[in-house]
Image (cartoon, rainbow, N blue to C red):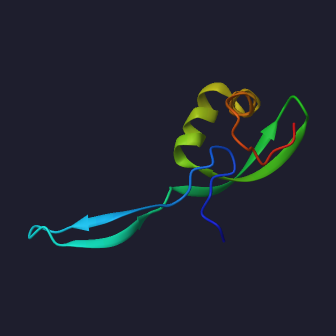
């Protein structure tokens, strides 16, 4: 299962865990993803998406349809057809 948000495109990034002795060990920072169903009233259909927690908060504020439209205007590859 890929760890990529369907709406924002967030994906894992690499970094270091730094100990108190300043020793560095490689690690991955993965996004906080959840599988969630959304109802789109404009198209009267349900869609199941893998979205990040920050995307869910934004969807709660402005709605799924407006969020997808904004992402398309930014040029983000959205996995939803509206």
Q: Where is residue 30 in the image (x, y as percent from the top left)?
A: 48, 61
Judged left or right of residue 9, residue 23 is left
Judged left or right of residue 79, residue 18 is left
Above or below, 25 against 12 in this view is below
Look at the image and tell me in which quarter the N terminus lies.
Answer: bottom right
| Residue at point 30%, 65% (across, down) | 16
2 vs 34, nearest the viewer: 2
Judged left or right of residue 53, residue 79 is right
Look at the image and tell me in which quarter the C terminus lies.
Answer: top right
Q: Position of residue 19 (x, y in %)?
A: 16, 69
Quarter of the image where one finds residue 76: top right
Above or below, 65 against 21 in this view is above
15 vs 5, nearest the viewer: 15
Q: Position of residue 78 (x, y in %)?
A: 75, 44
Above or below, 35 against 42 in this view is below
Quarter of the image where one finds residue 22: bottom left
Q: Position of residue 23 (x, y in %)?
A: 16, 72
């Amino acid at each position: 299962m890929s760890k990529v948000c369907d709406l924002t495109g967030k994906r894992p990034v690499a970094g270091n865990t730094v100990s108190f002795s300043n020793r560095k060990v490689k690690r991955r920072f993965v996004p906080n993803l959840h599988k969630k169903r959304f109802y789109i009233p404009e198209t009267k259909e349900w869609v199941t998406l893998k979205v990040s927690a920050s995307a869910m908060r934004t969807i709660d504020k402005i709605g799924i349809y407006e969020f997808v439209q904004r992402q398309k205007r930014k040029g983000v590859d959205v996995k939803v057809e509206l």
